[in-house]
Image (cartoon, grey):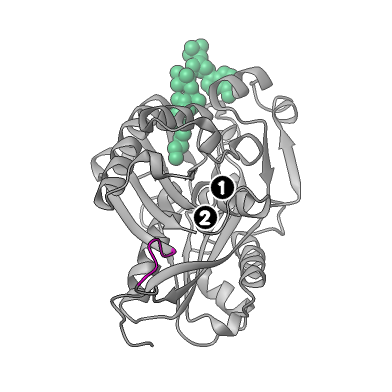
Amino acid sequence: MTVPNTHARCVILGTGSALPERRVSNEELSQTVDTSDSWITERTGIKFRHIASPDETTSSLAIASARNALDAAGLQGSDIDLIVLATATPDHTFPATATKVQAALGMTRGAAFDVAAVCSGFLYALSVADSMMRTGMASKALVIGAETFSRILDWEDRGTCVLFGDGAGAVVLGLETPAADDPSPRGILATQLHSDGRHHDLLYVDGGPSTTGTVGKVRMKGREVFRHAVVNLAEVLDQTLALQGLTSADIDWLVPHQANARILDATARKLGLSRSKVVVTVDTHANTSAASVPLALDTAVRDGRIQRGQLLVLEAMGGGLTWGAAIVRY
Ligand code: COA
């Protein structure tokens, strides 16, 4: 517990990610599913996805990504007093997968819990951690997005099973009070979250403990999801930028949820942003749900595209429907 400091900002101290070992190409998929490389590439931009083996779980991927992020931040698990983990594919119905990560990292204080907002989960987790830290409830946090979506795919439904992959991404957050004369201090500048439950049946899992008693499989009305995604993302991005008195010209990197290359292109076009400023990993990771934004972020940090001091805009949209955005000076 720290004393609330209304001037403090949450800063990203380190990023990390983890992918299952097995990488599956469109060609390999087309041997078991009635699809083709050309259909998947044209409609989605996806070429590969990583698929977890039976001994790779959401928690094992989350732990690997968290260790990676802690190393980048020069910290240990015992330095952390908050874990917020976004997932739609927890190891168990309960307890929260975050508590498994907590135990593995040797963190015995603070709080660890999961949030469920499917593909928007990382934005939700980031926003929750940011709010908790700035109100003094924690001083160093791990925010993780981790999924084994392959476990809830219907491998006979070619309209969904080709779109998703498994993985995890993490960021370590710390609190920093900017110097009074710093014109562009780093940290999370704003987050915006939205949901509209009227559309819960556009993208959902047809099972669960209190309904069927089974885990269920992903069901999606792809065209309608696509339509909502483009409109909602453009709106939330405009809104979040405007709140900070910023425009798309101020953005160094858009780090979007990696659902589909056509959605990324449409969003960039609506923002008037060049595609060269969009971090794209959908080709090699496919849609990893809550893991996709932190996986894309870590990829671009590690390959040197994202530099300290740059202005990043993160966004995502997913089942619920849920959507959100964050502006971060890295
Ligand atoms: N391989 C080959 N053909 C496929 C296929 C596949 N993997 N999946 C669907 N098809 C076929 C359909 O059966 C249909 O055939 P028909 O015309 O003979 O009936 C045809 O392709 C068109 O299907 P449709 O679903 O209308 O395609 P689409 O142009 O809408 O593209 C998506 C489908 C899923 C790629 C697209 O709707 C989409 O990207 N939606 C957003 C999904 C998303 O991002 N969800 C996650 C949000 S977090």
Would you identify the image quadrant in which residue 269 lies? top left
* Relative side of 130 to 164, left or right: left
Q: Is residue 44 visible?
A: yes
Q: Which mark is on residue 89? A: 2
Q: Which quadrant of the figure contains the N terminus?
A: bottom left
> Gap between marks 1 and 2, in whole Å?
6 Å
Q: Is 291 in front, or is 70?
A: 70
- Assess disc 2: are there few (<14), some (14-19) or many (≥20) residues with their C-alpha within 10 Å of its C-alpha: many
Q: Amino acid at mark 2?
A: Thr
Q: Position of residue 324 (x, y in %)?
A: 35, 49
| Residue 182 in magenta stretch | yes
| Residue 287 in magenta stretch | no
Residue at 33% x, 56% y: name it.
Answer: 191
Q: Which mark is on residue 298? A: none
Q: Position of residue 300 (x, y in %)?
A: 61, 49
Q: Position of residue 134 (x, y in %)?
A: 34, 75
Quick check: is the Cβ at mark 2 less than 8 Å away from ligand 1? no
Residue at 74% x, 26% y: name it.
Answer: 27
Q: Is 240 in front, or is 56?
A: 240
Q: Position of residue 75 (x, y in %)?
A: 62, 78
Q: Is 312 in front, or is 166?
A: 312
Q: Amino acid at mark 1?
A: Phe
Residue at 54% x, 48% y: name it.
Answer: 292
Question: Which residue is at the far front?
Answer: 181
Helix, strand or loop at mark 1: helix
Helix, strand or loop at mark 2: loop
Quick check: is the Cβ at mark 1 less than 8 Å away from ligand 1? no
- The numbered mark, 1 or 2, whose residue comes first in the sequence reads 2
Q: Which residues are magenta?
A: 181-186
Disc 1 + disc 2, Cβ < 8 Å = yes
Q: Is residue 318 visible?
A: no
Q: Identify the residue position indicated by label 1 in the image.
A: 149
